[in-house]
Amino acid sequence: MAKNTQDDGRPGAGEQGGEAVGGITGSLVGAGVGAAAGPVGAVIGGIAGAVGGWWAGEKAGKALDDWTEGDLEAYRDHFETYDAHAPLITTYDQAHPGYVVGHMAARNPDYKGRPFDDIEEELMHGWEDDEYEIMRPYVRHGYGRGHKRI
């Protein structure tokens, strides 16, 4: 388990990850994605704990400040027209965390101008077992749309 404070008094990964998840949860609720804050917060916490950097900081928590109803509508439309859903994904609500994580990743300045395939490995850290493979198309689409909006 990550230490909350390093020996020199600086915040450790555990503390930074907690701050990021707290800020992200607030942004998710503020962006009108309410119930998704739990699963998305857990994924972001996993990414923050594994790769740190932007994901573990305050700016990650503000990454959805520009989330709009248009984004929500676009992701719902994509879900309705996407014909290669994994058997376990039967509703938009199940796919929603993938769209959110991808959208947030597009806001990470470390990923600016980088294609999805270059940053994907970092995003895998937040998911359990084979869950990422199921969520991958939604994460990828969220990342692509998020980049178009910057």
Image (cartoon, rainbow, N blue to C red):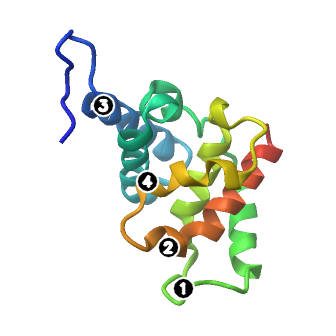
Residue wearing tag 3: 13
Secondary structure under the numbered disc 3 in the rendered image? helix
Check the image and report above or below for 6 versus 98: above
Secondary structure under the numbered disc 2 in the rendered image? helix
- Indicate the amino acid at tag 4: His
Between 138 and 50, the one lying in front of the other is 50
Which dot, 4 or 2, sits closer to the camera?
4
Residue wearing tag 2: 94
| Image quarter in which the C terminus is found | top right
Q: What residue is drawn where x is 49% and y is 39%?
A: 27
Q: CA distance from mark 1 to mark 4?
A: 24 Å
Could you tell which of marks 3 and 1 lies nearer the N-terminus? 3
Check the image and report above or below for 82 versus 108: below
Q: Position of residue 44 (x, y in %)?
A: 43, 47
Q: CA distance from mark 4 to mark 2?
A: 19 Å
Q: For residue 51, which quarter of the picture? A: top left
Q: Is residue 79 left or right of residue 37?
A: right
